Image: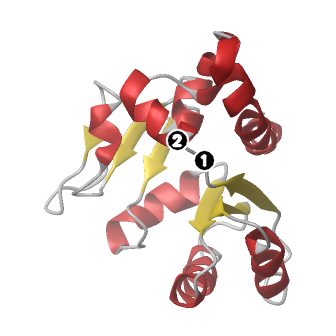
Amino acid sequence: MNIALTMDYGVVTNDIYSPIEEVFDNVLKVSPSEEFPDFPTDAEIIFDLGGYIEARSITVLRNSKVVLVPTINEYSILQTTINSVAEIEEYNTNICLVANRTKRGDYEEICQILSRFYKYPIFEVKESQSIPAIFKKKKSIKAMVEEGGLQKYHFQYLDRQFDKIIEFIRRHYE
C-alpha cells in the first residue's frame, strides 16, 4: 500500500480479504471466478497477488517490470518464499525480496538464509507503528513525514527504507 500511495500507482488484487480497500477507493478486486483484465504494458499498477501464485496470475508475472516478494523471519514463511521465488522465476527474474516487519537480527538471518538460494536484492522494512497509520490517515509514509512534527521523527527511518525499494523499482521501470 505504501509503495502504491507513494508512487501514485493503481492497485489490482486477487486477495479476497485484502485491507487495501480501506485505503484506496479505486482498487480493482479480481474475484476467484474472474480473469485478470489486460492492461497496457506501461500501466503503473501494483498487483497484490495475495501471497500465492495461480494460473491466472502468470500473465501478470510475465508482464511485470519488478516482482516484490515479501517475507518474514519465520521458518514456514521463509520456506514458502523460497518455493514462491522458484515458481516466479519461470515467468520473471526481475525479483527483489522484502524482509518485512523485521526486528533486531531478523534482516541478517533472512539475508543469510535466502542468499543460499538466490542472488536477488533483499530490502528491509522494519516493524513499525507507522504502518497502521497508513490505514488511519490514508496517506503514504512519505506524505506523513513531509507533514513534519512528531510523525516526521517517528516515520523518517521507515520512509528511507521504502525509498530504497522505490528507487529499485524506478531503475527497473524506466
Real-space CA distance between mark 1 and mark 2, rounded to the nearest whole angstrom: 6 Å
The answer, for residue 41, to whether it is visible in the render is no
Q: Are marks 1 and 2 in contact (CB under 8 Å)?
A: yes
How dense is the environment of label 1, judged by Cα within 10 Å: few (below 14), some, or many (20 and up)? some
Q: Residue at x 18, y 63 (%)?
A: 32
Please tell me whether mark 1 sits on a helix, a strand or a loop: loop
Vertical comparison of 167 with 56: above or below: above
In the image shown, does 95 or 154 lie closer to the viewer? 154
Q: Kindly tell me whether residue 132 is visible in this rendering.
A: yes
Q: Where residue 71 sits: x, y (%)?
A: 60, 70
* Image quadrant where residue 2 sits: top right
| Image: 136 above or below 17 | above
Q: Nearer the viewer, residue 124 or 58?
A: 124
> Residue 55, position in %: x, y?
35, 73
Q: Which residue bears the numbered disc 2? A: 131
Which of the 4 image quarters holds residue 15?
bottom left
Q: Residue at x 76, y 35 (%)?
A: 170
Pick out the residue farthest to the left. 33
User: Looking at the picture, does residue 79 appear above or below residue 131?
Assistant: below
How packed is label 2: few (under 14 Cα within 10 Å), some, or many (20 or more)? Answer: some
Q: Which residue is mark 1?
A: 128
Classify mark 2: helix, strand or loop.
helix
The disc labelled 1 sits on which kind of residue? Ser
| Residue depicted at x 47% and y 32% | 133
Please state if 161 lies on the left or on the right of 72 as rendered.
right
Instruction: State the image coordinates of residue 28 (x, y, percent, origin top left).
Output: 28, 38
> The residue under label 2 is which amino acid type?
Ile
